[in-house]
Image (tube, coloured by chain):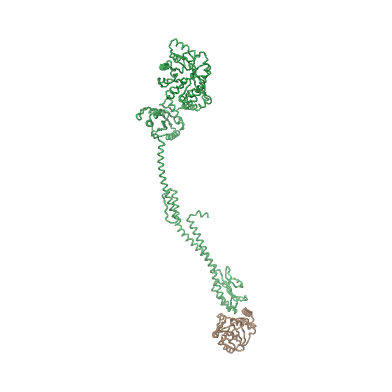
Chain colours: A green, B brown
């Protein structure tokens, strides 16, 4: 049956038709043939019986009279009956009176007469036995034997004809079925063809044209309805897709453009940069990435409001766009951060020229909504592939360079160099290992002596933190304090230093040396809420006399200090702690402001001392500071005193204290203690002080509170 | 079936077998007796004729005991009778009369006596038909042959089967 599955519907129908017709023809024809055969045989039998009866009647006289001749004549009449092959008149005693043979040559042996004289039918013949009687007397038997060969032949012919007719009928039926089944398979074929077309061309506007109203017609109608539905859905889908695409375009625009400046945004910049870096690497066409940061935009934004800030940004965008070369792109990647992609820059100088122009063009004053504003910018750039071939690295380089530009005083630009990189690495290392340093006790305190210029006595010491870095060696405060300040670790370090310094000062005090310990207070530490509490508790812990502690504050920290902060300073001062201004002269503090502060001393920055005594400007400043401090009843300490000339100058103009290499570098506690114990550690001061006193030029007021050894 | 009839039929078959010798007079008359029986068998008597068949022998009796064999059979619904008549007076009661005389004139007189009655007349005398006898038998070559004179048959009201006529050597 499996081959049936592979036949087309059309051939299946024809096949089924043919088989059905064949079976019907065979059953009908075969049945008819067999019925015909039996009926014919029955007819022949009854013919024979009639014949036998007639002959028996006719021949009874002949049999009665034993007239063989007459009997033979009577039997000879059977010649007209072609199917009778043999006939015999048999007397009662079994003697054959007369017999007849259709074909004398035929060797036919007649069967014996059965006792009951019932006819006998065999495959090739029928034997009939009829009693011969006269007036009720049985005289003998007439035996007639008929030949069935004719009938058999007729049956064969009949069957042959049947087969022929069946074949003919099948042929005709198949032909007609072929015609008729077209009405069934035709529409199906159409359907199939359309289905194939639709799935191939994806054209859902095609329809099947099937007119028949049978199940196939319904199928076609259903198929058409389905196609219509798909078509509608298809067009809906297309419309929806189009709308979605439009929305996506808009989103793309929003995603890639900055709405304020109409410049491209960070997203676009990153994509663009990726392409530029790839191109630079592939075609060896150097390009540069530059980062530009507005120096004081935050102030503008905070003080004049966002509308003005946006105006500034728009103006900046306009100016930057104006100075860029064709092919360069500028994007706004952050609040006041801009990024440039400079393609086709053969060397750093070409990139530097563009970046310089960018920085310069922003220095010109801007008029935004009636405000005249001075905006400057710092920029850094890095080259690809010279400096980096990876986007991340390139941007980091540019950022490093920009950071340095800012550190160098803003309103400038910086090209990335490998040295910057080393700086960055170093900075990074310090940053990451600083916290560990406290835990591992890698920090230690050094002390630098402060000398009373009136009597050569060591009256104080400045505590300085030193870091024995396991990899980088000994680090001085300048190397890591700014980093600690940024990371906030300075608070912890400050507490640690204060605790150590107090303990040391207490120890020396116990040993009989009243040394005032100066400890730096960083701006960050200065702003902490618990400044007073923590300081006083550390003091109390150490048991040190507050009078022996001096906190050094930077000028900047004091200038920015709020009233609240000043209140803290007053509290500390009331507790007895001395307060001094470190690096005095570097800031822009107004001198009149000083009188509001609860300070006890100022320290002249070493930059001024270095110019003594030859440089007129520095000398004048130092003299002025000393004079002012004296008039305000403040102590003055000179920092960075390196030679005797400077010391002489300071002595001459009445500077109270001095600190510097001339009197000793920062040393550990033990060395410092040894210095304290020596009788006359600074003998060179003796002639200077003595001469000045002799000349009567000094008008210093030595502090009586200082311990003089 | 009675023994007598079987005997007759057997006789007939023996006759037919042709094995009889010419010199055997007993065989001849046995055969002629069988023929007499058969003649009655293929002849129909009118309705009014009494049932059964009565065989009468007139004149010379050459049959002897052979003729008595007929009495074993039955014909027309009754046993067969055989009577030997001294004269023609009682021929009216006979169905079949065998005329033993060989003289033509004697035969003609006997036939005349039967005229008007349904009586089948049979003789084995030569020229018997000329004397008006209905059936004349002869024994030739060990066989019995017979001739039929239809005219007297018709007149007597008897009906003779055509099959019988067919077996006759001649029908006049």
Nearer the observer, A513 or B14: A513
Q: Is residue A133 left or right of residue A179?
A: right
Spot occupied by residue A39 in the image (x, y as percentages of width and height): 53, 69
Nearer the observer, A451 or A7: A451
The C terminus of chain B - image quarter: bottom right
Q: Quarter-wise, where is residue B45 in the image? A: bottom right
Q: Is residue A432 left or right of residue B35?
A: left
For this orientation, the residue located farthest to the left is A370
Q: Is residue A370 left or right of residue B64?
A: left
Question: What residue is at 52 percent from the left and 13 percent from the top?
Answer: A679
Q: Is residue A514 visible?
A: yes
Nearer the observer, A108 or A409: A409
Spot occupied by residue B52 in the image (x, y as percentages of width and height): 59, 82
Spot occupied by residue B62 in the image (x, y as percentages of width and height): 63, 85
The N terminus of chain B - image quarter: bottom right
Q: Quarter-wise, where is residue A115 in the image? A: bottom right
Q: Is residue A606 visible?
A: no
Q: Quarter-wise, where is residue B143 in the image? A: bottom right
| Tag count | 0
Spot occupied by residue A459 in the image (x, y as percentages of width and height): 49, 16
Q: Is residue A344 above or below residue A152?
A: above
Q: Is residue A355 above or below residue A616?
A: below
């Amino acid at each position: 049956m499996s081959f049936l599955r592979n036949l087309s519907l059309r051939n299946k129908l024809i096949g089924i038709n043919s088989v059905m017709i064949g079976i019907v023809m065979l059953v009908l024809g075969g049945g008819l043939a067999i019925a015909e055969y039996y009926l014919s045989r029955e007819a022949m039998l009854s013919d024979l019986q009639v014949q036998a009866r007639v002959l028996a009647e006719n021949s009874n006289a002949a049999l009665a009279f034993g007239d063989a001749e007459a009997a033979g004549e009577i039997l000879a009449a059977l010649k007209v009956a072609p199917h009778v092959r043999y006939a015999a008149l048999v007397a009662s005693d079994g003697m054959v009176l007369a017999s007849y043979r259709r074909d004398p040559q035929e060797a036919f042996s007649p069967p014996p007469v059965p006792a009951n004289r019932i006819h006998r039918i065999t495959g090739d013949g029928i034997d009939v036995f009829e009693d011969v009687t006269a007036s009720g007397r049985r005289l003998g038997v007439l035996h007639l034997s008929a030949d069935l060969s004719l009938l058999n032949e007729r049956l064969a012919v009949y069957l042959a004809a049947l087969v022929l007719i069946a074949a003919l009928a099948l042929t005709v039926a198949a032909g007609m079925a072929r015609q008729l089944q077209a009405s069934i398979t035709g529409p199906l074929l159409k359907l199939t063809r359309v289905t194939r077309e639709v799935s191939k061309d994806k054209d859902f506007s095609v329809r099947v044209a099937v007119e028949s109203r049978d199940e196939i017609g319904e199928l076609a109608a259903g198929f058409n309805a389905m196609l219509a539905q798909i078509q509608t859905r298809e067009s809906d889908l297309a419309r929806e897709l189009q709308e979605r695409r439009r929305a996506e375009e808009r989103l793309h625009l929003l995603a890639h453009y900055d709405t304020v400046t109409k410049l491209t945004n960070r997203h676009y910049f990153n994509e663009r940069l990726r392409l530029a870096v790839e191109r630079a690497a592939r075609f060896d066409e150097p390009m540069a990435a530059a980062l530009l940061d507005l120096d004081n935009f935050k102030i503008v934004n905070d003080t004049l409001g966002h509308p003005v800030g946006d105006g500034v940004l728009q103006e900046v965008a306009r100016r930057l766009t104006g100075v860029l070369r064709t092919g360069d792109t500028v994007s706004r990647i952050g609040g006041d951060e801009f990024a440039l992609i400079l393609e086709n820059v053969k060397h750093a100088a070409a990139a530097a020229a563009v970046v310089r122009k960018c920085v310069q063009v922003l220095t010109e004053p801007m008029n935004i909504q009636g405000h005249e504003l001075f905006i400057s910018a710092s920029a850094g750039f890095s080259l690809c592939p010279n400096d980096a071939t990876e986007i991340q690295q390139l941007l980091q380089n540019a950022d490093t360079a920009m950071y340095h530009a800012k550190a160098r005083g803003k309103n400038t630009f910086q090209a990335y160099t490998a040295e910057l990189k080393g700086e960055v690495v170093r900075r990074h290392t310090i940053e990451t290992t600083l916290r560990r340093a406290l835990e591992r006790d890698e920090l230690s305190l050094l002390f630098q002596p402060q000398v009373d210029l009136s009597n050569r006595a060591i009256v104080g010491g400045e505590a300085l933190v030193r870091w024995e870095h396991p990899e980088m060696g000994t680090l001085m405060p300048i190397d890591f304090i700014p980093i600690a300040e940024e990371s906030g670790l300075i608070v912890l370090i400050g507490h640690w230093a204060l605790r150590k310094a107090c303990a040391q000062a207490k120890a020396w005090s116990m040993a009989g040396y009243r040394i005032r310990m100066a400890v730096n207070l960083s701006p960050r530490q200065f702003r902490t809420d618990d400044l007073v509490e923590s300081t006083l508790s550390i003091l109390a812990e150490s048991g040190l006399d507050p009078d022996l502690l001096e906190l050094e504050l930077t000028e900047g920290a004091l200038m920015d200090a709020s009233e609240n902060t000043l209140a803290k300073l007053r509290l500390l001062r009331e507790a007895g702690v001395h307060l001094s201004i470190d690096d005095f002269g570097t800031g822009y503090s107004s001198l009149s402001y000083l009188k509001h502060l609860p300070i006890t001393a100022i320290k002249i920055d070493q930059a001024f001392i270095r110019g003594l005594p030859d440089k007129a400007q520095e000398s004048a400043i130092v003299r002025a500071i000393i004079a002012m401090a004296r008039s305000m009843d403040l102590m003055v300490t000179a920092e960075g005193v390196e030679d005797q000339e400077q010391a002489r100058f300071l002595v001459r103009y009445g500077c109270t204290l001095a600190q510097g290499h001339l009197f000793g570098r920062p040393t550990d506690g033990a060395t410092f203690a040894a210095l304290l114990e020596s009788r006359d550690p600074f003998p060179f001061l003796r002639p200077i002080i003595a001469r000045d006193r002799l000349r009567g030029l000094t008008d210093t007021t030595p502090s009586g509170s200082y311990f003089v050894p | 079936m009675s023994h007598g009839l079987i005997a007759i039929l057997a006789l007939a078959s023996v006759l037919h077998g042709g094995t009889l010798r010419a010199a055997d007079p007993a065989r001849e008359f046995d055969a002629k007796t069988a023929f007499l029986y058969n003649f009655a068998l293929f002849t129909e008597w009118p309705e009014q004729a009494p049932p059964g068949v009565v065989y009468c022998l007139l004149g010379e009796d050459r049959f002897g005991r052979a003729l008595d064999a007929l009495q074993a059979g039955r014909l027309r619904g009754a046993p067969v009778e055989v009577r030997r008549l001294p004269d023609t007076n009682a021929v009216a009661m006979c169905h079949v009369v065998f005329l033993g005389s060989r003289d033509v004139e004697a035969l003609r007189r006997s036939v005349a006596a039967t005229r008007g009655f349904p009586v089948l007349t049979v003789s084995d005398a030569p020229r018997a038909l000329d004397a008006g006898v209905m059936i004349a038998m002869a024994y030739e070559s060990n066989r019995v042959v017979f001739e039929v004179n239809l005219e007297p048959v018709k007149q007597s009201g008897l009906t003779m089967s055509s099959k019988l006529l067919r077996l006759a050597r001649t029908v006049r």
